[in-house]
Each structure stands twice: as structure tokens, then as C-alpha cells.
Image: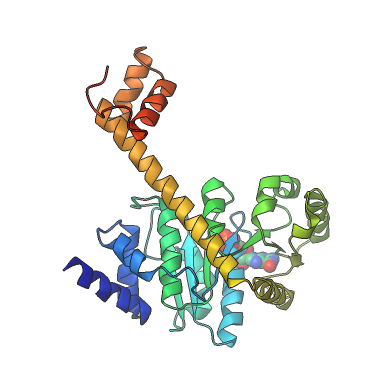
């Protein structure tokens, strides 16, 4: 029964039945009991669809740019999937208003599937839900699947770097130095997009970004930097050419499949590890809050609990009744 249901949903995704697809995405988001087996059935490390992460500070023009990129790929007859992730929004499934408005050129195009994800409800965390949603849209042969994340915090960076290619969007005037000098942020962009090139300050931004990139120890890994204006369309062709040539440089399919699989497995290991450890603490103390009480009362320490977890994992202890 379970397996035939799984097959039915996986089939709906593969034939790109839009309602089935929306249903499966909701199941993934809400941690439905069938979600893992559907994902298991759909996963193909050597799938041909590529995923493109678009990240950068709020207001950088990511949605406007996404709109332009959709137009580009639609002209090449690709079906395009878009996942707009906003961790600060409580909404999921429905519309993130601003994003929808920015992408409305494509709202009625059946070759474009747009899905918004907010912070609410994800049992495995927003990044796990996004990870799986990317795989679902890729399995439905949307190619590419774009994922726009708002902000440059840890969570957003993690989500964007799950994609096969990541665009980091920076703009003049949002505290250029701060933006450019965050070395960690530089490392996440395969392509750095300097948007709002129609605005003053773009040259200054380009200089400060290039100066930061000089500091990369391996200059052969230096990401291309492209100036454009998502609003006027200036430089968009340069950007699409850069993306296309980046994609064709990723010729080693096996290598992409390996990287993709390793990121997904790593993310699942982290997710399950956190779940397992919390569950062990809860089994032992009743709840995480009670564990904290025990620590404050001097009965143990966070490290003592860590040790206990290690011993549980290594089977050196029985789970309950240890003193
Ligand atoms: N001047 C200018 N404004 C832009 C450009 N791209 C986007 N915008 C504007 O910047 C604002 C934020 O854009 P949006 O795409 O929603 O940014 P997001 O938060 O990164 O998704 C909107 O008012 C856009 O019209 C650009 O290249 N030049
Ligand atoms: Mg946006």
C-alpha cells in the first residue's frame, strides 16, 4: 500500500503533473510520512537538470534578476523551476508577494513553475525542505531549477550552496566594504553578480570586490565577476554567457553527481545527527529544558552530556537508568 502510493506520487512528479508536483512539494515541506520514500524513488545523482542558487542581501535585485534569467532560459525552450526561500517569512507554499510581483512576467507560463517557501512547518528545517524541493523539480525535468534565498546568513548560504552553481548578487550602496570583505561570502559564489550597474558606485563596488578576490589563495578558483542591471537589462547577456560557459565547464557529469550526492548526504547526516542527539537527551532527561536544569543544578555539564551521547552512540552504555 505504502509503496504503491509512493510510486504514484513519484510518477506524477516524473510526468510533471503540476498538481501532483505541488502535492509532493507540500509533503516534503510538511515532513509527510511518505516523503522520504518518494525522495528515495526520485533521486538520480546523474540527473541532467542543473540547479542554480541565487543569494545576496535583501533588495539586491535577486528576484528581478531571476525574472530575467527565466526569460533567457524560456527563449531556449527550457522548462524553468523556481524556489523562492525566505526564512523570515511565515508563509509557505503560497506567494511571497514581492517575489511574485517581480516574476510576474512568467506567472501564466506553463513552462515555469514557481514555489515559495517560508520558515513555517519544516520538520527537517528549511534547508532540508529546500534541498528536497530542488530534487523534486529536477526530477520533473525543470532545467534549470533556480533557488532564490533572501539574506546572507548561515542558513541562506547553506541553502544556496546546495545548488550546482551559485550566483552571489551584490549591489552598490549596501555597505560595499562589509559586503565585499566577508571572505566567507566570497567563497560561496561561483559567479559574482554586481547588480544595479545603472546606479552610482558600481565601479567602486567592482574595485572592492576584485581587491577581495585578489586575496583568494588559489587564483585559478577565482570566480568571474559580471556587472549588470536586472532592471534595464544591460549586461544580462554577459551574465547568461558567463553562466552558460560555467555550465559547459562542468563537463564531468560524474564529478557533479559526486559533489551533489556528497552535499545531500552530508546535509541528511547533520539533520539526522541533530535529531538523534536531541532524542537521546530527551529520553534521558525528559526534555532539553530539563537537561539544562540539571546542568544549572550542578549535576552535569554540557560536556558531560556530550560524553554521554558519545558513549550511547558507541554502545558503551544502556540508554536509560545510568547514574
Ligand atoms: N536601479 C536598479 N534597481 C533594481 C535593479 N534590480 C532590481 N532593482 C530594484 O530593487 C528592488 C529590489 O529588487 P528585488 O528583485 O525584489 O530584490 P531581492 O530582494 O534581492 O529579490 C526593486 O525595487 C527592484 O525594482 C537594477 O539593476 N537597478
Ligand atoms: Mg526577492
- Residue at (74, 56) in percent of width and height: 172
- Residue at (53, 83) in percent of width and height: 78
Residue 282 is at least partly visible in this image:
yes
- Residue at (30, 63) in percent of width and height: 37
Q: State the image coordinates of residue 142 (x, y, percent, origin top left).
A: 47, 77
Apparent side of residue 77 relative to residue 12 in the rendered image (left or right): right
Apparent side of residue 128 relative to residue 7 in the rendered image (left or right): right
Q: Quadrant of ligand 1?
A: bottom right
**Quadrant of the rendered structure where residue 227 is?**
bottom right
Is residue 233 shown above or below 76?
above
Is residue 71 shown above or below 90?
below
Q: Quadrant of the N terminus?
A: bottom left
Q: Quadrant of the C terminus?
A: top left
Apparent side of residue 74 relative to residue 245 in the rendered image (left or right): left
- Residue at (69, 72) in percent of width and height: 249
Q: State the image coordinates of residue 96 (x, y, percent, origin top left).
A: 44, 63
Looking at the image, which is closer to me, 189 or 38?
38
Q: State the image coordinates of residue 236 (x, y, percent, origin top left).
A: 70, 75
Q: Residue furthest top?
A: 298
Amino acid at each position: 500500500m505504502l509503496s504503491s502510493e509512493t510510486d504514484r506520487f513519484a510518477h506524477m512528479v516524473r510526468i510533471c503533473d503540476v498538481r501532483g508536483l505541488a502535492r509532493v512539494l507540500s509533503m516534503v515541506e510538511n515532513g509527510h510520512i511518505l516523503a522520504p520514500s518518494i525522495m528515495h524513488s526520485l533521486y538520480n545523482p546523474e540527473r541532467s537538470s542543473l540547479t542554480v542558487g541565487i543569494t545576496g542581501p535583501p533588495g539586491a535585485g535577486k528576484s528581478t534578476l531571476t525574472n530575467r534569467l527565466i526569460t533567457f532560459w524560456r527563449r531556449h525552450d527550457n522548462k524553468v523551476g523556481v524556489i523562492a526561500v525566505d526564512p523570515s517569512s511565515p508563509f509557505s507554499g503560497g506567494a511571497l508577494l514581492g517575489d511574485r510581483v517581480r516574476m510576474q512576467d512568467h506567472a501564466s507560463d506553463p513552462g515555469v513553475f514557481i514555489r515559495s517557501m517560508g520558515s513555517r512547518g519544516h520538520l527537517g528545517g528549511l534547508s532540508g525542505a529546500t534541498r528536497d524541493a530542488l530534487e523534486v523539480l529536477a526530477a520533473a525535468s525543470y532545467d534549470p531549477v533556480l533557488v532564490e534565498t533572501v539574506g546572507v546568513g548561515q542558513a541562506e548560504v547553506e541553502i544556496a550552496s546546495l545548488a550546482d552553481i551559485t550566483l552571489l548578487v551584490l549591489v552598490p550602496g549596501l555597505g560595499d566594504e562589509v559586503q565585499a570583505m566577508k571572505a566567507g561570502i566570497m567563497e560561496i559564489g561561483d559567479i559574482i553578480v554586481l547588480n544595479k550597474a545603472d546606479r552610482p558606485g558600481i565601479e567602486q563596488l567592482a574595485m572592492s570586490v576584485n581587491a577581495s578576490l585578489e586575496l583568494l589563495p588559489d587564483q585559478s578558483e577565482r570566480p568571474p565577476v559580471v556587472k549588470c542591471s536586472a532592471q534595464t537589462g544591460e549586461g544580462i547577456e554577459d551574465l547568461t554567457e558567463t553562466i552558460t560557459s560555467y555550465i559547459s565547464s562542468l563537463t564531468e557529469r560524474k564529478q557533479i553527481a559526486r559533489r551533489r550526492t556528497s552535499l545531500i548526504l552530508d546535509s541528511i547526516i547533520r539533520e539526522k545527527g541533530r535529531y538523534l542527539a536531541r532524542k537521546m537527551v530527551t529520553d534521558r532527561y525528559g526534555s532539553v529544558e530539563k537537561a539544562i536544569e540539571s546542568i544549572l543544578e550542578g549535576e552535569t555539564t554540557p560536556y558531560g552530556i556530550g560524553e554521554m551521547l558519545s558513549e550511547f552512540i558507541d554502545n558503551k552504555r544502556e540508554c536509560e537508568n545510568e547514574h
